[in-house]
């Protein structure tokens, strides 16, 4: 139960990371992050079905397609509206999510499709516990990606520059950082992280145009962790996944899908800065 | 003397508000030039315009013979113009070391270690506090960090915006000694200061801004002796 909660949680964590990466670079919320994930998963599926590519190659297609989509969205929408407020960008990405879902429905229909998994279905038995390889695979792959992101953001020039922009864009400019380039890279990177999450989650939830709703859980996870904090996003995702999996044990099982909303409302009223967030993030 | 940085009739507005009007000034290679003026006279705007953070509505900016008026800030930094902004604007969540590394964003990777050592040798307090979050430094240490961070890009021209603001006199003296050392190492300096007396003591020449216009210019000694400058900026 906890393991499968952590697996769901890793997906939420990746989603939350994608949202936070874009938010830190541009102070904008990308509401279309979920639909971008959905489109990437469909791309992988199409690559397998229509073009007969092997699984690993379809993942490359999904990640590459997501990167291109992220790049285009940033260029065409975000960059073109420099005078738009963050509020405007939020509405724009909300609109984009509807458009992407409609387009995906036209191309792939609104049906559900089974999505093959990298990981076998035979449970792994460790002593008295039986573990689903899917869960372990999701957790392992997510943790590897998180580790890679950690190294990128703390050990490389690019990652440091992105964090500098998040703290103070004007000072970052004076260090010779191109804030525009960082915005572009953030959108591409977030889309790629979302694509990995999509390919990991699709075998579990089935492939469908409704997949994009996962953005709400990602958002909740990010808020739980104190929006803007990357370690917070990971912790928030894991926590949300576990709570969501355990909640039906103690509460009516129908409550499960309301858990993110209840948590979101709870955290916003009780501790708006998030679990790991700073207490005073708002400057007066 | 060869002009390294030149502003020709530069005008800047923030929306409807005119902040600079036909400002022309020249900074020669190797000089320290002071830019003086009361609060809101447009000193910071002048520096921001040179760095490309603010776009002039009129006029031209030349750096080492190239017209940089329409360049992006990252290109201007990469070309060798460093800027230590008003209020320091260090990255307070970063450690001292990370601040310096971001300062070297435009530097070739193989030069970073040597530049880091040079910066830490110049500011020993920073060496002691390398791993500390920059937000925990005192005001004087933050100013030193802001200067050291700009030096990581190995600028040929350094724009300094009120580096002694809010510092105790002893620290302010130390900062001015640093500025002279940096200049002695071959870096041209354009220095904005409230502390006109100290600024004129280190600068060879100066300009005086008043509500967005240059109203006076000359050798530091002449400015320091001018009755109007004395009345307005040197306390009589
Ligand atoms: N971002 C901005 N938006 C609108 N007006 C601005 C902005 N920045 C500066 N101004 C105005 O432009 C004028 C020049 O400001 P600037 O900051 O360049 O002055 P300054 O000489 O540096 O002053 P100080 O000594 O207070 O630092 C002032 O009237 C100021 O109110
Ligand atoms: Mg100023």
Image (cartoon, coloured by chain):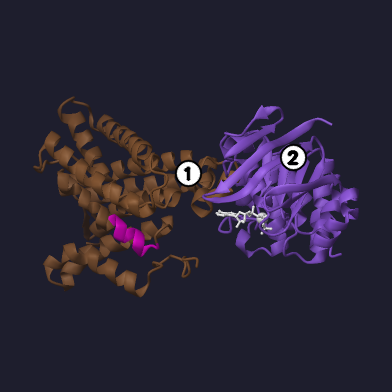
Where residue A283 sits: x, y (%)? 50, 66
Query: Which chain is painted in brown?
Result: A
Determine the secondary structure under disc 2: strand
The answer to if A72 sits in the magenta stretch is: no
Q: Which residue is mark 1?
A: A152
Q: Residues within 10 Å of mark 2 (few under 14, many from 20)?
A: some
The answer to if A219 sits in the magenta stretch is: yes
Q: Nearer the viewer, residue A121 or A229?
A: A229
Where residue B65 sits: x, y (%)? 71, 27
Q: Which residue is mark 2?
A: B25
Task: Give the residue at x 65% y 58%.
Answer: B87
Nearer to us of marks 2 and 1 is 2
**Left or right side of B97 for A232:** left
Task: Give the residue at x 63% y 57%.
Answer: B131
The reply to whether discs 2 and 1 touch (Cβ–Cβ < 8 Å) is: no
Task: Give the residue at x 75% y 45%.
Answer: B190
- Which segment did they paint magenta? A218-226
Determine the secondary structure under disc 1: helix
Q: Quadrant of the N terminus of chain B?
A: top right
Chain letter of disc 1 in the image: A
- Find ligand 2 in the image and state its quadrant: bottom right
Residue B27, visible in the rendered structure = yes
Task: Give the residue at x 26% y 58%.
Answer: A3
Query: Which chain is painted in purple?
Result: B
Q: Main secondary structure of the magenta part?
A: helix
Residue lying farthest top?
A: A51
Q: How many marks?
A: 2
Where residue B31 sits: x, y (%)? 82, 40
Q: Nearer the viewer, residue A135 or B33?
A: B33
| Up-down relation of residue A195 to residue B229 (above or below) | above
């Amino acid at each position: 139960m906890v393991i499968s909660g952590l697996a769901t949680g890793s997906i939420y964590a990746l989603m939350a990371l994608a949202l936070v990466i874009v938010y830190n670079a541009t102070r904008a919320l990308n509401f279309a992050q979920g639909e971008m994930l959905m489109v990437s998963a469909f791309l992988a599926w199409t690559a397998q079905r229509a073009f007969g590519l092997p699984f690993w190659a379809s993942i490359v297609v999904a990640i590459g397609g997501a990167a291109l989509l992220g790049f285009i969205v940033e260029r065409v929408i975000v960059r073109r509206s420099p005078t738009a407020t963050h509020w405007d960008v939020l509405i724009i990405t909300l609109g984009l999510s509807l458009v992407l879902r409609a387009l995906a429905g036209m191309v792939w229909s609104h049906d559900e499709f089974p999505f093959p998994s990298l990981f076998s279905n035979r449970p792994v038995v460790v002593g008295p516990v039986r573990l689903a390889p899917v869960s372990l695979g999701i957790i392992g792959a997510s943790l590897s990606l998180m580790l890679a992101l950690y190294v990128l953001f703390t050990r490389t020039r690019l990652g440091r520059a992105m964090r500098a922009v998040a703290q103070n864009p004007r000072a970052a400019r004076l260090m010779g950082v191109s804030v525009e380039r960082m915005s572009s890279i953030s959108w591409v990177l977030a889309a790629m992280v979302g694509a990995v999450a999509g390919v990991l989650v699709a075998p579990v939830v089935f492939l469908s145009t409704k997949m994009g709703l996962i953005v709400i859980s990602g958002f909740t996870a990010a808020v739980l962790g104190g929006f803007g904090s990357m370690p917070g996003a990971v912790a928030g995702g894991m926590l949300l996944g576990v709570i969501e999996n355990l909640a039906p044990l103690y509460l009516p099982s129908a409550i499960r899908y309301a858990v993110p909303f209840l948590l979101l409302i709870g955290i916003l009223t009780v501790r708006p800065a998030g679990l790991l967030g700073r207490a005073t993030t708002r400057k007066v | 003397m060869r002009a390294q940085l030149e502003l020709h009739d530069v005008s800047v507005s923030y929306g409807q508000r005119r902040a600079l009007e036909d400002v022309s000034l020249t900074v020669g290679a190797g000089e320290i030039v002071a830019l003086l003026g009361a609060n809101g006279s447009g000193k910071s705007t002048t520096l921001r315009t040179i760095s490309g953070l603010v776009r002039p509505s009129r006029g031209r900016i030349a750096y080492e013979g190239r017209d940089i008026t329409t360049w992006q800030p990252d290109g201007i930094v990469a070309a060798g113009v460093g800027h230590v902004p008003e209020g320091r604007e260090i990255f307070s969540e970063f450690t001292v070391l990370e601040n310096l590394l971001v300062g070297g964003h435009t530097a070739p990777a193989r030069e970073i270690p040597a530049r880091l050592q040079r910066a830490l040798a110049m500011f020993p307090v920073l060496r002691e506090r390398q791993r500390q979050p920059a937000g925990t430094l005192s005001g004087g240490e933050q100013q030193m960090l802001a200067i050291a961070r700009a030096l990581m890009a190995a600028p040929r021209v350094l724009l300094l915006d009120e580096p002694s603001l809010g510092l105790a006199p002893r620290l302010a003296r130390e900062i001015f000694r640093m500025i002279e050392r940096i200049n002695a190492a071959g870096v041209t300096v354009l220095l904005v200061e409230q502390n006109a007396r100290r600024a004129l003591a280190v600068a060879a020449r100066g300009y005086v801004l008043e509500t967005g216009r240059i109203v006076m210019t000359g050798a530091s000694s002449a400015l320091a002796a001018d009755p109007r400058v004395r009345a307005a900026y040197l306390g009589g």
